[in-house]
Amino acid sequence: MGTLKKNELILKSSTEFPCSYIKGRFEKRIFVNIPKDKTGNEVISKLTQKGFRRNYDHMYIPSCKNCISCISLRLNISKFIYSKSNKRNLKTNSDLSLVDNQCYSEKRFKLFNQYCRIRHSDGQMRYMTQSDFINFFHRSKNKTKIFDLINSNKELYGSILLDVLDDGYSAVYSFFDPYSNKRGLGKNLILTTVKKLKEQKKSYLYLGYWIKESKNMKYKSSFNNVEYFLNGEWKDKL
C-alpha cells in the first residue's frame, strides 16, 4: 500500500479516541492524505477499492485494538435486483426526482441542519457552520457529485454527496427531511443512485463502513447483492 505508481503515500496512525458507533469502545485509524495534484482521484479510487473511506482531505481505515466491527460494504450494480420493498419505496416516492446540482444551496444547508438536529442530536455534525458545510460538501480535492431529491415544485427532500470513482460512486454523506418518516427517504437516495449507476453501466456503489452492532447502519446490509471487504478481498458473504 506504500506507493501508487510514482506517488508516495505516507500512512499515518491516529491516537485512540471514543468510537463514534459503539458506546464504550475506542477507535484508532490509519490514514493517508489525498495528493493535491491530478492523481488524487486515482488514489481515492484505488484506496476505496481496498476498504478505505474518505473524510475531507484524507483516506482512512480503522485499526482498532481488539475490534474488527467496521467492514467496508458495496453494492454490485450489475447484479442488483430491486426487491419488492425496493419497488414499494420507489413507488411511494415516484413524485420525487434525483437531480444533479453542484451549486451551493441555502435550502440544502437548512435541511442538513434540521436532519442533524432531529436524527443525530448527539453527533458532532450538528455543530457545523455554513462555512464548515461548504468546505465539506463543495470544496473536495477530488471529483464529486451532488444529487438533490426534489418534487415538481423543486422542494428539497434530500441530498447525497458522492465521490466519483473509476468503477462507480462512493457515498460520502446523505441527509433528508427527518419528518417524512413514511417515505423511507434515506433508502430512496440509495435506490435512485443505483438507478443512475445502472444507466451509466458502472460497477459499484460503495456505502462506507457497515457495523453489525449499529442500528443506524442496518439498512446497508438490507440490500441484495451486497459485497463485504474481508481479509483483503470483496466477498458476497460474511
Image (tube, helix red, strand yellow):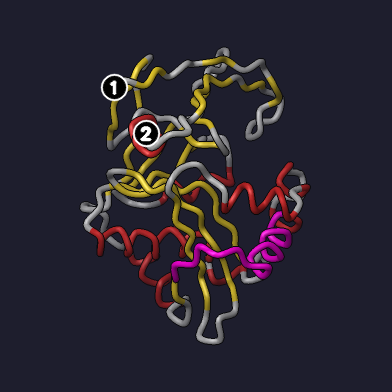
Q: How far apart are marks 1 and 2 (CA)?
A: 10 Å
* Relative image position of residue 35 (x, y in whole percent): 46, 30
Q: Can residue 221 be seen in this view?
A: no
Q: Residue furthest bottom?
A: 153
Q: Given the image, on which type of amino acid does mark 1 rest?
A: Lys
* Closer to us: 22 or 153: 153
Q: Do the residues labelled 1 and 2 touch (CB within 8 Å)?
A: yes
State left or right for residue 34 relative to residue 192.
Answer: right
* Relative image position of residue 87 (x, y in whole percent): 36, 70
Q: Is the magenta stretch mostly helix, strand or loop?
A: helix
Residues rendered magenta in the picture = 99-116
State left or right for residue 80 relative to residue 21.
Answer: left
The residue tagged with tag 2: helix, strand or loop? loop
Indicate whether residue 108 is drawn in magenta: yes
Q: Given the image, on which type of amino acid does mark 2 rest?
A: Thr
State left or right for residue 172 relative to residue 113.
Answer: left
The numbered mark at residue 171 is: none
- The residue drawn where x is 74% and y is 42% is 124
On the image, numbered disc 1 is attached to which residue?
Answer: 5
On the image, numbered disc 2 is attached to which residue?
Answer: 39
Q: Quadrant of residue 65?
A: top right
Check disc 2: other Cα within 10 Å, few if <14, some if 14-19, many if 20+: some
The residue tagged with tag 1: helix, strand or loop? loop
- The residue drawn where x is 37% and y is 33% is 39
Q: Earlier in the sequence, mark 1 or mark 2?
A: 1
- Quarter of the image with the N terminus is top left
Q: Is residue 142 visible?
A: yes
- The residue drawn where x is 67% and y is 65% is 111
* Relative image position of residue 115 (x, y in whole percent): 68, 59
Does 91 sit above or below residue 86?
A: below
Does 227 sit above or below residue 232?
A: below
